Image (cartoon, helix red, strand yellow):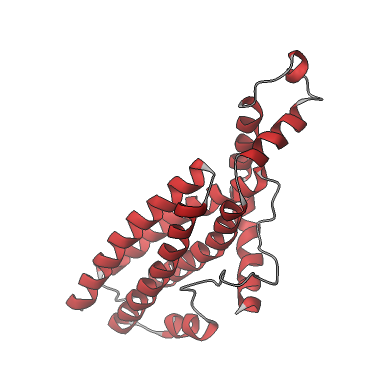
């Protein structure tokens, strides 16, 4: 499980960091201005220390873990959605859902990558993940290959079933951040993820019943 996680993370992070460059820059800047300081605090020499202190006070370990885990989790959902969008003979309602998931989770990857950069934290979690921090809901290599090979209605059903499980895992991770996180933006995103993905699970269950 860890090996697959690291492989996925390494691939996704490179793209995410490139896309999120602007976001990470603005996040660091806002931290610097949020700390009132000494008369010379506006000088370039004082800014880095002020920014680092503000960033350190603005997040905790739960926030870091949430971002590091949710980035590859979201990336896999985007990958699954891309697979569906490349297939033929997929019901329009399922294609629309895949488009919506990709449109929502892509920017969230950029946002979380920016946070980690502003917190001076690595985007990828350490190789040895702590107990209780498993990547809940992630598909294995065999699952992804099966989805890639499936076509038509079979692919639609498989995608919906897999994405329901995937969303359930993301919701568990988001609820942990909701109760343990400190950073206001990260906690807000965790709540947004729970709201959006619980609604999408209901939508996917209805779509499955109609196929």
Q: Position of residue 70 (x, y in %)?
A: 52, 60
Give the left or right position of residue 61, taking residue 108 as reference.
right
Q: Position of residue 94 (x, y in %)?
A: 29, 69
Q: Nearer the viewer, residue 33 or 11?
A: 33
Q: Quadrant of the C terminus?
A: bottom left
Q: Nearer the viewer, residue 73 or 85?
A: 73
The single residue placed furthest to the front in the displayed view is 179
The single residue placed furthest to the right in the displayed view is 45
Q: Position of residue 79 (x, y in %)?
A: 49, 68
- Considering only vertical position in the picture, is 38 above or below 56? above
- Residue at 67% in and 41% down: 56
- Considering only vertical position in the picture, is 122 above or below 39? below
Write down the quadrant of residue 126 in the picture: bottom right
**Could one spot residue 38 in this view of the protein?**
yes
Q: Nearer the viewer, residue 55 or 81?
A: 55
Write down the quadrant of residue 23 in the picture: top right
**Could one spot residue 96 in this view of the protein?**
no
């Amino acid at each position: 499980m860890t090996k697959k996680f690291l492989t996925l993370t390494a691939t996704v992070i490179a793209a995410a960091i490139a896309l999120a460059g602007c976001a990470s820059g603005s996040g660091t800047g806002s931290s610097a201005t949020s700390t009132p300081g000494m008369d010379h605090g506006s000088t370039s020499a004082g800014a880095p220390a002020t920014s680092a202190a503000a960033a350190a006070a603005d997040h905790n370990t739960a926030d870091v873990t949430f971002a590091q885990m949710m980035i590859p989790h979201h990336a896999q959902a985007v990958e699954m959605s891309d697979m569906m969008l490349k297939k033929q003979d997929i019901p329009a309602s399922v294609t629309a859902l895949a488009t919506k998931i990709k449109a929502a989770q892509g920017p969230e990857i950029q946002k979380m990558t920016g946070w980690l950069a502003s917190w001076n934290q690595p985007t990828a979690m350490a190789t040895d993940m702590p107990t209780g921090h498993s990547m809940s809901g992630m598909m294995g290599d065999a699952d992804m290959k099966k989805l890639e090979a499936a076509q038509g209605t079979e692919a639609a059903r498989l995608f919906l079933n897999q994405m329901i499980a995937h969303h359930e895992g993301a919701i568990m991770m988001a609820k942990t951040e909701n109760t343990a996180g400190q950073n206001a933006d990260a906690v807000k995103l965790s709540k947004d993820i729970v709201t959006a993905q619980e609604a999408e699970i209901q939508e996917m269950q209805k779509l499955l019943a109609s196929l």
